[in-house]
Amino acid sequence: MSLQIAEQYEANEQYDKAYDEYKKLYASNPKDMNVIERLAHLAMMLGNKTDAADYYTKLLDFDMTNTMVYEQLMDIYQDTDRFKYYINRGNLHSIEHKYDHAINDFKKALANTQDEQDIIKTRFILASLYAQTGNNTKAIDEYLKLTDYDDIPSDTFLNLAKLYMAENALPSAINVLERACSKDIESDKIREQLALLYLRNNNPQKAREITKNNLLKAKCLLEEGDTYEAYKILEAADEKVKSLPNYHTLLAQYYFIKKEFDKALSEVDEFDRLEKNSPLTYQMRALINESQNDDYNAHLNWGRYQLVRGEKDIAINEFLNAYQLKDDDVNLVTTLAMLLEESGDKNHAMEFYEKLSKLEPNNTRALEKLADFRNSLGDYRAECDYLELWYEADKRNYKLIKRLAECYEKIKNKPSAVEFYKKYLTVAATADDYEKVKQHLAKLENTDIAPDEGEGLIDKIMRFFNKE
């Protein structure tokens, strides 16, 4: 009943009484967003801006992207608190993705406060915005300014280390996390990240000394050459740990060191099952293949590794090396044809489509590519040859049949053109152009075509060069 009373007071413009009733409702249910919104609105109407600001701020706990709230808070603080005014304007610009404006707002907020906690929070946001907009140098500067204070978020050091890593400054990233530990800001995240960086910096012993992660300890021991202790940790792992992808990469590394390559490959397969198409899968397989002196599969896996990483040119080079060792692998030939075509090297790609058509005579995709390529060169005779091969593998393809007819017509082979137009009319009775093709065929049958006319461009060029 209290809600109905509050709404009735509000409808009767008895705002002070409505406000009191809504406060009672808020006291009994402080998580009712609608009540908080009414309290904020009525507080503004009654001129109680302090309470209005409190209630509007509480609304942000429900929705940090509520633009109306930020606009109301900006109105409240515009003439009373410039720091909070710019903070709210910066937040508004951030959720509107106007990051340059947001950065300027937070810089102005800093100029309007001397409170240490306000400065820390604002600089942290400012650093995050710089990082988000790709200005790593300014982001680093802001985080470094924060490290001069005592009571700062531990993410300050983690974010700073991440930025240094993005700038390929591994020693600086390590130094930052070591500094955090020296200031007693050590957390599990900082400790484990520092251990990973030590390992990356070829210091597995130091990493092992600080990590609490058993798998990372095993990794460090493997790097140190202590396979016995590493395997003990892996063997003692519980079922939950054994279901993790990196557990199998460590077992693969262990078997690799022990030169038990079949077991190593089996663990890589298990890793791939848990984490599909990871570049690490192909990298590990390639290293194992190299140790087995299996150059062909090593090149294949290095190619796949580069392909997953987006390095297509390097991948093509690896695949070409594999092709030199084995030129009858249909999957490899297909991959090379497609990659070379994607990279714009059509002439080279067609060599592999040609090879593919020899390995798989019924490969209609390869034949179509070859026919299209010859068409683009004006070599219609060769196009007809490929279309004929395609037709042998796909005799009910009415679009192909029509294309063959048109191609034969281009090279003035009237009997073949007529033959395939008739076949088209037989299999494409419901086609939209049925009547049009029928009329064209009738006209063609009553037209004389000189057989030596209508040569393709390539035919003409070759005939010219073959003249004695």
Image: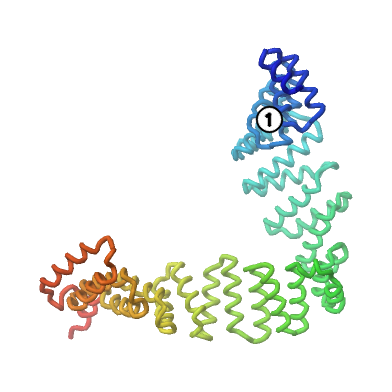
Question: In the displayed structure, does residue 388 sit left or right of residue 116?
Answer: left
Quarter assignment of residue 91: top right
Residue 456 appearing in the image: no
Residue 38 drawn above or below residue 303: above
Q: Position of residue 458 (x, y in %)?
A: 26, 75
Badge 1: residue crowd in 10 Å (few <14, some 14–19, many ≥20): many
Residue at 73% x, 27% y is: 35
Viewer-proximal residue among 421 and 431: 431
Q: Secondary structure at mark 1?
A: helix
Using the image as rendered, state which of residue 122 and residue 393 is in the foreground.
393
Pointer 1: what residue? Answer: 86
Image quadrant occupied by the C terminus: bottom left
- What percent of the width, then of the height, locates residue 452? 15, 78
Q: How is the image coloured?
A: rainbow
Residue 450 spot, x, y in % from top left = 12, 76
Residue most toward the front?
1
Q: In the shown orientation, is residue 97 left or right of residue 187? A: left
Considering only vertical position in the picture, is 105 above or below 324? above
Residue at (48, 79) in percent of width and height:
333
Looking at the image, residue 55 sits to the left or right of residue 180; the answer is left
Amino acid under label 1? Tyr
